[in-house]
């Protein structure tokens, strides 16, 4: 059973990815700051289904210096890494002109630097095996912009440039690198919006609706599979046509 890491995998979109990849037969290692009841339930469901597995490992990606030790633990407990989904991130809002530098640094540290360092260590295992899959979770805000999220947008845009260049670095080694750019996902990104705002976003979308978590999960599952063996360096947008 191939090991796939999902960062930020204990809740929300990350939890959905963990469930979906386990259902496709992967052994998922969900890494997040804290364990949740939902991730424990998902692990039990995976055992009952008998297809894949879900394991949980606590870690705070703000602690960049501890990432090498994290991967030593992963190798010892689980063996080689086949796939990585860089999903962990924070979405702190703030107008740039008045945003504290500490908040800017935290966003860049968690949303940009941490995925780069995590990938650095994960890709070494993939290089040894001669295959692997990396999926970076970006956002449509990286290309469309959104008032009050300029720093967040910068971090998500950085993942797209990272995706395209890394795909060229490791392509000859049999490793694919892609990004998924979700839109305003139902029950997740739109949780703090009122109904009128959600309706406005839906009306702007080609399909007149919002995507849900499962739509993003299916995209990640595809990119992690053999069906996508010749797909690399691309960005798969899942937004119900919001950016069409």
Image (cartoon, rainbow, N blue to C red):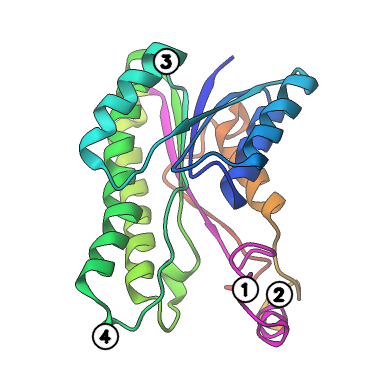
Q: Are marks 2 and 1 in contact (CB under 8 Å)?
A: yes
Residue 49 position, x and y percent, is: 79, 22
Task: Report the residue at 38% width, 55% height from top.
Answer: 160
For marks 4 and 1, give the one nearer the viewer. Answer: 4
Task: Report the residue at 39% width, 37% height from top.
Answer: 59
Residue 133 position, x and y percent, is: 47, 31
Q: Are marks 3 and 1 in contact (CB under 8 Å)?
A: no
Task: Report the residue at 28% width, 33% height from top.
Answer: 67
First of labels 3, 1 by sequence position: 3
CA separation, marks 4 and 2? 35 Å
Q: Quick check: 163 above or below 48? A: below
Residue that carries the numbered disc 1 in the rendered image: 242
CA separation, marks 3 and 1? 38 Å
First of labels 2, 3 by sequence position: 3
First of labels 4, 1 by sequence position: 4
Q: Quadrant of the C terminus?
A: bottom right
For marks 3 and 4, give the one nearer the viewer. Answer: 4
Q: Which residues are magenta?
A: 174-202
Residue that carries the numbered disc 2 in the rendered image: 206
Residue that carries the numbered disc 3 in the rendered image: 80
Q: Are marks 4 and 1 in contact (CB under 8 Å)?
A: no
For marks 4 and 2, give the one nearer the viewer. Answer: 4
Q: Left or right of 97: which side holds 225?
A: right
């Amino acid at each position: 059973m191939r090991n796939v890491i999902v960062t930020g995998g204990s809740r929300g979109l990350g939890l959905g990815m963990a469930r979906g990849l386990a259902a496709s037969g992967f052994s998922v290692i969900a890494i997040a700051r804290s364990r949740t009841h939902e991730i424990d339930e998902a692990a039990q469901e995976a055992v009952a289904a008998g297809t894949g597995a879900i394991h949980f490992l606590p870690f705070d990606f703000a602690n960049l210096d501890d990432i090498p030790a994290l991967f030593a633990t992963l190798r010892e407990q689980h063996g080689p890494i086949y796939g990585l989904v860089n999903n962990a991130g924070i979405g702190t809002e703030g107008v740039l002109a008045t945003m504290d530098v500490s908040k800017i640094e935290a966003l860049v540290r968690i949303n940009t630097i941490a995925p780069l360092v995590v990938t650095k260590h994960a890709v070494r295992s993939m290089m040894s095996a001669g295959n692997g899959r990396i999926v970076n979770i970006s956002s449509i805000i990286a290309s469309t912009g959104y008032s009050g999220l300029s720093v967040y947008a910068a971090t998500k845009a950085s993942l797209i440039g990272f995706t395209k260049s890394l795909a060229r670095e490791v392509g000859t080694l049999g490793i694919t690198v892609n990004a998924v750019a979700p839109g305003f996902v139902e029950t997740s990104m739109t949780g703090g919006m009122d109904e009128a705002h959600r309706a406005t976003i839906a009306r702007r979308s080609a399909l007149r609706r919002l995507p849900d978590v499962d739509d993003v999960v299916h995209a990640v599952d595809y990119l992690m599979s053999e069906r996508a063996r010749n797909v690399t360096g691309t960005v798969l947008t899942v937004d119900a046509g919001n950016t069409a």
